Image (cartoon, rainbow, N blue to C red):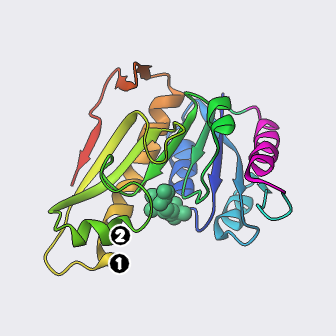
Amino acid sequence: MKRIVVLISGRGSNMQAIARCCAEQGWPARVAAVVADRADAPGLAWAASKGIATAVVERRGHASREAFDAELMRVVDGWAPDLVALAGFMRILGPAFVRHYEARLLNIHPSLLPAFPGLHTHRRALQAGCKAAGATVHFVTPELDHGPIVMQGVVPVRPGDDEAALAARVLATEHAIYPLAVRWFVEGRLRLHDGLVTQTEGASQVLI
Ligand code: GAR
């Protein structure tokens, strides 16, 4: 059984999608723990209600970002994870953390990378007049919101969309692609070579 640790900062709807699919689809894995950088992250209560171990590592109380990263690493390593999945974890992780989990650290970002790394992706997509938007699951590298792309979900931008409407449509595709990408990882179906990801079967995009 592979062990997955999910890192969240907020509601954790992607974490819930992963945990649900893992249990319902009988993956050779389990969500061993959910770790948040905020004690008030609503996703923690959901995880606890499902019997998943939880932990909190807050930035305050650590003298530097490096010290925070080191403590987070120590806590996460307590579950000896095969995979660490960032799911709305809103902190930039330093190079030592990223190197430590190299090739076993995934993130989901609410844009079609390499477009719109960083924050306010939906606002920026609307301002740019994009006709399609979406989300990307990628392996994490030290450069923010970059790294080998595992899977993308694409949705239309509709006339009259505001940020909330577009975010909701993109979130629905996130809940489809992130569990699938994690499933591929735990089933050993992803190959990472020269900064590119291939997988042994199935399509690497969800088009809605
Ligand atoms: C998701 O839309 C995720 O893509 C985004 O935060 C949201 C978390 O929602 N992540 C980022 O912006 C990371 N750069 P959730 O807590 O309900 O999964």
| Mark 1 residue CB less than 8 A from any atom of ligand 1 | no
Residue for badge 2: 167
Whether residue 79 appears in magenta in the rendering, the answer is yes
Callout 2–callout 1 Cβ contact below 8 Å: yes
In the rendered structure, which amino acid carries the disc numbered 1?
A: Ala
- Residue, x 75% and y 54% (percent of image)? 51
Q: Does the residue tagged 2 have its C-beta within 8 Å of any atom of ligand 1?
A: yes
Q: Which residues are magenta?
A: 63-80
Would residue 177 be found to the left or right of residue 133 on screen?
right
Tag shown at residue 63: none
* Residue at the spot 45% in from the left edge and 47% down from the top edge: 145
Q: Amino acid at mark 2?
A: Ala
Of the pair 96 and 41, the residue shown nearer to us:
96
Q: Position of residue 121 (x, y in %)?
A: 36, 64
Position of residue 45 measured from the top left corner of the image (x, y, whole percent): 71, 67
| Element marked by disc 1 | helix
Q: Is residue 85 shown left or right of residue 143? A: right
Mark 1 highlights which residue? 164
